[in-house]
Image (tube, helix red, strand yellow):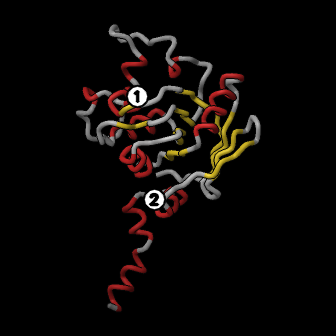
Amino acid sequence: MEKFTTLTSTIVPLPIENVDTDQIIPARFLKATSKDGFGDNLFRDWRYDSNNQPIKDFVLNNPTYRGSILVAGKNFGSGSSREHAAWAVAGYGFKVVVSSFFADIFKNNSLNNGLLPVVVSEEFLAEIFAAVKAGPAATLTVNLENQTITNDTNGFSEKFQINAYKKNCLLHGYDDIDFLLSNKDKIESWEKNK
């Protein structure tokens, strides 16, 4: 996995509440077992019509909005436990997803795949949507070490929570196996001395 420390990026706004995993990646695309290509079908039924033509009004088809941070409405990632949803969001190129609430399974799947879910207050979320509406060049800065997210338009920040183990893994670019390998000497020493 790629290391994550600090990211400043423009915002892709998705002010829709209760986005479930079937909307993130429809079930018909779950046949593959590798992560490759899932980003192509992120929000597939919202991005394309029945003739496979891009729907102009959907945010991912609007060239005004680009960036590595997806900002979504409350309750993002509910529904089934498919890890493919996190694969699709990360595969599209997002590094961070911001919402006022995430489904636990989606949140954990994201962290396991190098995608940082950041929970903010509903007031802070509203401020982000207002900032990007006022100017699409608005940016957010996410500092994982300090566990802060800053709306660069007005300078307001909030702290966010993250599991200490997952934070350590993201900071070092470790998945669970990499973490174990990084502690190989300690494990071997413990085994010898037990």
* Percent position of residue 114, x then y: 46, 49
* Percent position of residue 73, x then y: 51, 31
* Percent position of residue 133, x then y: 66, 22
Circle 2: element type:
loop
The residue labelled by disc 2 is 174
Q: Quadrant of residue 69?
A: top right
Left or right position of 54 against 149 = left
The residue labelled by disc 1 is 42
Q: Nearer the viewer, residue 143 or 192?
A: 143
Going from N to C along the chain, the mark reached first, 1 or 2, is 1
Image quadrant occupied by the C terminus: bottom left
Q: Amino acid at mark 2?
A: Tyr
Pair 1/2: label in front: 1
* Residue at figure coordinates x 33%, y 42% from the top left: 83
Name, please, the residue furthest toward the right.
154
Left or right position of 152 against 3 = right
